[in-house]
Amino acid sequence: MRELVGAAGVDGRRLRHALTLLCDGQWWTLGDLVRETATSRRGIEALLRAVELERYGERFRIPLAHTPEYQDLLAMAPGPEDPVGHLVPHYRHVLERLETLIAKAPRGRHTLDHVAATPETVLRRALLLGARFWLPGSRLLCVGDHDLTSLAVRMVHPEVEVTVVDIDDRILAYLDEQDLGVRTRWADLRLGLPGSVREHDLAITDPPYTPEGIGLFVARGLEGLKGDGRVLLAYGASERTPALALKVQNALSSLNLAYEAIYPDFNRYFGAEAIGSAADLYILRPTTKTAPAVAARLESVATAIYTQGPQSIEAETGQPAVELGDFEPDLLVGDWPKSLPQPRVKLGTWLAKPYLGKQGTVAIAVPAGLEAALPRLVLAAQSAHIRLYLPEPLTSRAPLEALAPLAEIDVRGAIVDVTRRTPDDPAGRIAHRILSRGHGKIANAWREALITESGGTLTKNEARTLIRRTAPWADDLTPVEAPLHRLTSLPTAIHTTLT
């Protein structure tokens, strides 16, 4: 044990802290010890091999009779100061509710690098926002929110307007179910930030822990900020891998940000034991040189940003060869061979704004790992016929079911054909009109269609009132950025306004 802590040098405090806990008479699991000490799993395992342990199932401790042997190695001094720990006891009711909400939330997806933060961590993030910044009248953007930080902020600071952008439709639906006033927007940040998500005072993100993921999520957060805003970033690395931390910090430095604060080991997680189940919390401030750096960063967005799955940075990221066959599109969307003569547009540009050129027929190449974007890629089109080329056969039609009022869907393995149709019932025609304007506000198209279906008997104000009573979320939301559950519920809501 002396050799182990001696070899760790000044960083030996982590191991001494773990040793202190093992000597205090309590039983510990490996995961609990990792999380409590913010020490990597490999570091704790090395410590456990160096001492004699008493075991009780999966729990262990150093036998009480042996603890005097380690007295001169123990670290009794407190760790890094917690800036809001003293406030937590005053919000016990919020913590209890967060424990329930997090337990019932959708399970994490390893392909999106999901690891759940502890309920106390989520509460402490909300408390730190209030301790550090003046929040009345402010707007917060959560760039991804698997941890449900948005709900904690709304419970502790209901005066804050909170918006969440996320690629996971399950998370967006769950947030809306809680009815805490969180605005939800779908986005794959590799393709862009929704147009309605701008001019926030603060942004917070806990992104994939790769240099590519950190750089992209922070850049998107900055894109959604006012010039004098702040980005709060959770990022952790093992004490054994400083070179990886350097790569991430270089990605941040390239955005010309000022580091206002770094709170060590502020965030704790259920899992992520390779990094000690912990992450620091950065507070980053843009400078006058940040905006051009962000623009340059977003010009070269890579799709491989995760540590696992088809879009991991280690995975094969080359776009598979796609053959058009007998299909002759007017427009190509995505990455296509340069030899093809048709005009083309990037996926991100396609989703961001209406394409003004001819698009009678469209061919869209969809990279692996971007399947969640399928309905949005269709909604962005004005074409009568769209053909989607996927790298693998489509396993579920469910995400495309929301498009039923708009088009016929034909799935043939890795090729999906979408053909526009016009329903003959009033509710179907209204839904068709809304979905046909992928970049237009849902409420505006809905209002115009309602007036048309009423034969002109409804005024604009009457139609607007009907929509706001039925679907208050529709005011500034477009179909392209709408969470899937909003699109799926649209026919029922339209029927309500008709009756």
Image (cartoon, rainbow, N blue to C red):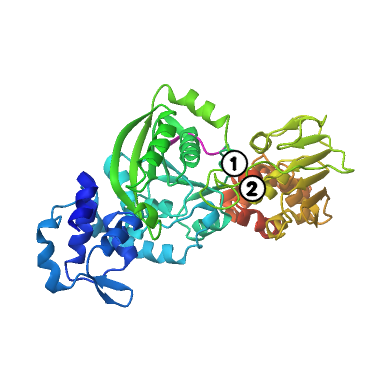
Dividing the image into 4 quarters, which one contains the C terminus? bottom right
Q: Is residue 69 left or right of residue 212?
A: left
Q: Is residue 83 visible?
A: no
Quadrant in the picture for residue 469: bottom right
Q: Position of residue 450 (x, y in %)?
A: 72, 49
Q: Which mark is residue 303?
A: 1
Crowdedness near tag 1: few (<14), some (14–19) or many (≥20) residues, C-alpha within 10 Å: many
**Number of numbered markers:** 2
Q: Is residue 314 above or below residue 76?
A: above
Q: Position of residue 79 (x, y in %)?
A: 20, 50
Magenta residue check for 51: no
Q: Earlier in the sequence, mark 2 or mark 1?
A: 1
Q: Is residue 52 above or below residue 257?
A: below
Q: Is residue 208 above or below residue 57?
A: above
Q: Is residue 371 left or right of residue 339?
A: left
Label 1 near label 2: C-beta < 8 Å? yes
Q: Nearer the viewer, residue 21 or 82?
A: 21
Q: Main secondary structure of the magenta part?
A: loop
Q: Residue at x 35, y 58 (%)?
A: 41
Crowdedness near tag 2: few (<14), some (14–19) or many (≥20) residues, C-alpha within 10 Å: some
Residue numbers of the magenta segment: 196-200
Of badges 2 and 1, the one in the foreground is: 1
Q: Is residue 339 left or right of residue 259?
A: right
Q: Residue at label 2?
A: 370
Q: Position of residue 183 (x, y in %)?
A: 50, 48
Identified by mark 2, the residue type is Leu
Q: Which mark is residue 293?
A: none
